[in-house]
Image (cartoon, rainbow, N blue to C red):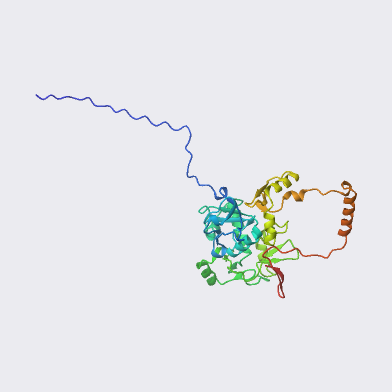
Amino acid sequence: MVHTTSHSPVMLKPKSPKTPPTKAKKAKDVAKHWSQTVNECIVSAGPDGLLNLVLKGGADNGQFCYIGEVKHDKINYHSGKLHQDEIILEVQGQKVAGYTQRDLQAWVKQVSHNGAPVMFKTVHAGLLPKDLRQYLSTRFQKGSVDHDLQQTIRDNLYLRTVPCTTRVPRPGEINGVDYTFLSMEDFLALEKSGTLLESGIYDGNHYGTPKPPKEPTLPPFRRTNSASMLLPGPHPSSEGKRRRNRSNVETTSVPKAFNDVEQPTTPGTRKRQLERSKSDQDLGSKDMGPMPPNWEVAYTEEGNPYYIDHNTETTHWLDPRLSEKKKQSPLECDEDDRRNKVEKVEKDQQPLKPTMPELPFGWEKVEDPHYGCYYI
């Protein structure tokens, strides 16, 4: 006899829904804007007098300047690190986006002369495209950091290249100086070849900005009668070019790095300077009081002090407190000091022959019979 057993249906208990977390999970992969991740690094030349940095890219290659292969054991770091393929935004306070590779190398060589510490501001690879054409073709809100960076690139480009257009020259404009005037066929061929970093149409005419030449055919900067003013343009009559560049003085005035103190010129002088002990420097620093706001003193591996200005993000050999030390008046001095001061005043009142300041390292004065005096 077969017994059958009837089973009552099994009721499955439904799973209770998960309790939502009390706090929202943080997004791990939220991308930061490049301006929030700017890397600051201070380096100086080694015993061989070289920074041992490989600089690549440049506007002449249609790219931002960027760091090439990095050998950390060859680089004399003071703070931070540099990494391969990082985009270079500033060197010693100078905005270099839009520089040619040659110009960047010349600037780095100048500010690192005699082992001076140099501050680099870079952005990690991938946060900014290397391609200038791609970046310049992107629309950004006016006043944003990206819009400002685009303007920096354009300002630096206008100092190194001559824009081209299909429109007819206006009275007084010189072909190859104010613009390069092209036929529509030639312009389109230039655009197709990838030579133009920017191009567009305005009032029915085509305009474009070519890549700067790798080797400038004429001096990129021209000094006017005012010693503090540099104007772009290879020709004195390139007024149109100067009008296009809204900030020519700012972008062409070379920052004076370490210009307040003479740089040592001989190995022996530099060696004696580097051998000054840190304790002696600290003792002298205490006598001069606290550092100005946003200034910091740091030391090289050899114990040589240098000073970081966080206001302008530049480094200096000269202690900023020296310029703030108040000089004594004659009434605050003893008899001998007063006599010396009076003699000095009388000597200072004698007419002096005007002297030209020494040119920055790497610059040269050229007297041209056609273009006049300019500096390269």
Seen as rendered, the residue at the extreme bottom is 369
Q: In this view, does 196 lie above or below 125?
A: below
Q: In which quarter of the image is residue 283?
A: top right
177 or 343, nearer to the observer: 343
The residue lying at 71 percent from left, 66 percent from top is 223
- Side of 274 where 137 appears, left or right: left
Q: Position of residue 98 (x, y in %)?
A: 59, 60
Q: From the viewer's side, name the closer residue of 49 and 20.
A: 49
In the displayed structure, does residue 95 sit left or right of residue 9? right
Q: Point out residue 71 in the picture as x, y percentages from the top left corner.
A: 53, 57
At a point 77% along the width and 48% down the height, the residue shown is 324
Residue sitting at 48 percent across and 34 percent down? Answer: 23
Above or below, 351 relative to 144: below
Viewer-proximal residue among 98 and 4: 98
Q: Quadrant where the C terminus lies?
A: bottom right
Q: Is residue 253 visible?
A: no
Q: Which residue is drawn at 69% across and 46% down?
A: 279
Q: Position of residue 70 (x, y in %)?
A: 53, 57
> Where residue 194 appears, x then y in whole percent?
51, 66
